[in-house]
């Protein structure tokens, strides 16, 4: 039998050289086994395939948890900011950055600030110093995701079709389902993730409003997530290009992790703490409190239920503005929620290893679920594979503080429901018409395909 190219795979997790998300420096690797352990016991991926069966290709969901746990920095994200730095020398392009909710309550840790402290104003300022022409907040895209996903949930419930509906904002979870549970794909929400939605809106709606050639826009998202590097390269993520009859134009161009941004700022000798707070640019500026809590496990569920309740009853639910039943770091949470005349049984799962356990219960058919949120990383995006690293002795405490930081922002905002966001209302009136419209489906929804073939090493064009 041919020798595997994945050296020491009995000790460490295999990593493909052509991975879009992570890389390994073998000289730094001390064969501690931490990466293999987290992939197997937290993520439930390693150990569920055999290299002899997969054609010697590692099965990876791009979550980056191996990079988070690596004590020597041997495993890290692909440093795409280096390519971006070079491209930004070309001033013929318009460089547009967006910032994901979870990074603003974590980046400050690198500068000895308390976990959970909101530093979004300094992040905006820092990105402009690096050369951004516009800076937006991904919470705007999250609000669009909420309206589309809430409408989709209500339609499925009324038709009693494809229930339970699973959330689909987490690309590592989506890929996990495509590989290990393709039978679930019809149950995944077709609504794109906030980053993908915002990227599409920038290259369509924003480009039109500002009279900018979409082909000359470079979309960049700063995220807590390494799997987003994979997501934006999916062949389905070029709806903005299809809108202008150019399939080579993708909705997003670069994903830069929180750690990459920190590294870039240090290379440029930008004193982050001395920066004056700045605000996001107009039009796609920022979202409601519901958009902010997308960054933590349970946040998508809570945000969507707030809007689904309004769609069904015409009223704001005070209970869902502080929905404790779906909050916290527990791996699996369940609850019942009443919306109008409907009582929904819901679940929130974080950590894909917990998904295996949860789906065993689901397959037994003893419990009916209507709506299920899944995030691949423990804690959700606050614990993403591109966040500042946490020492194992304080990891849960820091994640809890990051989580509370997002909920605190939500509590303080005057607009806490996605449907109340005036800019969201305007974009539907002027462009998207209504949630679930034909143009909304064209631009804000996507599709999935089984990747079960990866487990048997079949060669399929992607």
Image: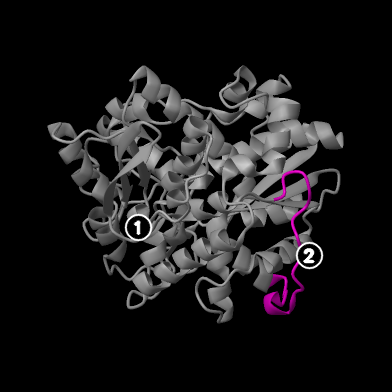
Of 78 and 338, nearer the camera is 338
Q: Quadrant of the N terminus?
A: top left
Q: Can residue 460 be seen in this snapshot?
A: no
Of 163 and 109, nearer the camera is 163
**Residue drawn at x 30%, y 55% as measured from the top left:** 13
* Relative side of 365 to 194, left or right: left
Residue at the far bottom: name it.
112
Please tell me in which quadrant of the rendered image residue 279 appears: bottom right
Of 55 and 360, nearer the camera is 360
- The residue at which mark 1 appears reads as 378
Q: Magenta includes 283?
A: yes
The spot of residue 315 in percent (x, y) is 52, 39
Mark 1 or mark 2: which is in front?
A: 1
- The residue at which mark 2 appears reads as 129
The spot of residue 4 in percent (x, y) is 27, 46
Q: How many marks?
A: 2
Give the secondary structure at mark 1: loop
Q: Magenta includes 88?
A: no
Q: Can residue 133 be seen in this snapshot?
A: yes
The spot of residue 203 in percent (x, y) is 72, 34
* Relative side of 62 to 3, left or right: right
The answer to which of marks 1 and 2 sits earlier in the sequence is 2
């Amino acid at each position: 039998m041919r020798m595997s190219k994945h050296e020491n795979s009995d000790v460490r997790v295999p990593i493909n050289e052509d991975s879009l998300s992570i890389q390994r420096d073998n000289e730094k690797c001390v064969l501690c086994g931490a990466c293999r352990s987290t992939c197997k016991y937290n993520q439930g991926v390693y150990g569920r395939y055999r290299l002899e069966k997969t054609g010697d290709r590692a099965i990876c969901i791009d979550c980056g948890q191996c990079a988070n746990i690596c004590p020597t920095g041997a495993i890290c994200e692909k440093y795409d900011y280096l390519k971006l730095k070079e491209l930004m020398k070309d001033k013929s392009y318009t460089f547009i950055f967006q910032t994901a909710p979870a990074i603003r309550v974590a980046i400050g840790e690198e500068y000895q600030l308390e976990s959970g402290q909101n530093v979004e104003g300094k992040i905006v300022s820092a990105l402009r110093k690096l050369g951004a022409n516009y800076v937006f907040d991904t919470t705007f895209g999250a609000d669009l995701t909420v309206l589309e996903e809430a409408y989709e949930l209500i339609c499925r419930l009324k038709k009693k079709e494809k229930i339970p509906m699973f959330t689909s904002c987490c690309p590592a979870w989506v890929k996990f389902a495509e590989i290990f549970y393709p039978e679930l794909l019809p149950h995944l929400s077709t609504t794109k993730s906030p980053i993908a939605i915002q990227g599409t809106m920038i290259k369509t709606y924003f480009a039109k409003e500002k009279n900018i050639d979409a082909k000359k826009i470079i979309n960049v998202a700063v995220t807590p997530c390494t799997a987003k590097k994979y997501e934006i390269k999916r062949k389905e993520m070029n709806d903005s290009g299809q809108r202008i009859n150019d399939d080579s134009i993708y909705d997003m161009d670069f994903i830069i992790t929180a750690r990459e941004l920190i590294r870039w700022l240090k290379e440029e000798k930008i004193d982050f703490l001395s920066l004056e707070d700045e605000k996001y640019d107009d039009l796609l500026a920022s979202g409601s409190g519901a958009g902010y809590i997308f960054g933590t496990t349970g946040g998508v569920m809570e945000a969507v239920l707030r809007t689904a309740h309004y769609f069904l009853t015409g009223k704001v639910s005070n209970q869902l503005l502080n929905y404790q039943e779906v909050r916290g770091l527990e791996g699996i949470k369940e609850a019942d929620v009443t919306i109008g005349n409907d009582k929904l049984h819901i679940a929130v799962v974080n950590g894909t290893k917990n998904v295996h356990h949860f789906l065993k219960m689901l397959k037994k058919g003893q419990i009916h679920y209507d709506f299920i949120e899944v995030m691949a990383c423990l804690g959700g995006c606050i614990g993403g594979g591109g966040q500042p690293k946490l020492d194992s002795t304080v990891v849960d405490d820091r994640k809890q503080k990051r989580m509370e930081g997002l909920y605190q922002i939500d509590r303080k905002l005057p607009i806490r429901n996605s449907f109340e966001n005036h800019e969201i209302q305007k974009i539907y009136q002027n462009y998207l018409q209504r949630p679930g419209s034909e143009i909304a489906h064209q631009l804000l929804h996507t599709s999935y395909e089984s990747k079960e073939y990866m487990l048997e090493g079949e060669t399929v064009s992607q």
